[in-house]
Image (tube, rainbow, N blue to C red):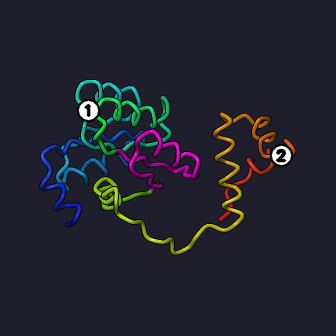
Amino acid sequence: MTGATQIAEMTDKSLLIVEDDKAFLERLARAMETRGFEVTACDNVSEGLGHIGKAAPAFAVVDLRLGDGNGLDVVSALKSQRPDARAIVLTGYGNIATAVTAVKMGAVDYLSKPADADDVVAALMASATAKSELPSNPMSADRVRWEHIQRIYEMCNRNVSETARRLNMHRRTLQRILAKRAPR
């Protein structure tokens, strides 16, 4: 059964999109409407939370970093209002630590920007038992190390000293690693 067929069979097709890039928000909203969703578009956390308070949608697509806060707050509020809702997180700043946090807060998937509407629909409609494909280009050992450091850094609430202690690493070495871009 394809994602479009699943959407057609559903009764509640309400979708909340929370994205601060207005051009991307409008394109995604139009694309999702053509795929059968009833879209509500918001460009900040407070609007998204307000909409969830009025009527929690069945689906949500939320940007991670928004001008007035963190998109994970929207995901958390949605899951507390409507536990069966399916939310995905979009971000241009992808790393494993934030992906894990997003999933723990109730997101069903985590997509890096730019994601097209077909990717979004596939993520929203994927079954929980669907097995993901093996990556065509797995992460390098340097990237895995960098992701691990980022995860510990996030768990320590972005405290460099605490992260360095937990990783048994010199603070300045950690600062240099954090200042660099992620390896490929």
Helix, strand, or loop for circle 1? loop
Q: With 68 as the anchor, is 152 left or right in this view? A: right
Where is residue 78 shown, x and y percent of the image? 34, 33
* Mark 2 or mark 1, earlier in chain: 1
How many badges with numbers are in the image? Answer: 2
Image spot of residue 92 (x, y percent):
51, 51
Q: How crowded is mark 1: few (under 14 residues within 10 Å), some or many (20 or more)?
A: many
As measured in the structure, the alpha-carbon distance from the residue carrying label 2 to the one carrying label 1 is: 45 Å
Judging depth in this view, the residue of 180 and 56 nearest the camera is: 56
Q: Name the residue under label 2.
A: 168
Q: Is residue 59 left or right of residue 8?
A: right
93 and 168: which is toward the camera: 168
> Which residue is located at x 45 percent, y 39 percent?
105
Outermost residue on the front side: it is: 129
Q: Is residue 75 above or below residue 31?
A: above
Outermost bottom residue? 136
Q: In the image, is 74 to the left or to the right of 183?
A: left
In the image, the segment drawn in magenta is 87-113
Circle 1 residue: 56
Q: Is residue 123 magenta?
A: no
Looking at the figure, which quarter contains the N terminus? bottom left
- Residue found 46% across the figure and 46% down from its top: 103
Q: Residue at x 74, y 48 (%)?
A: 179
Q: Which of marks 2 and 1 is in front?
A: 2
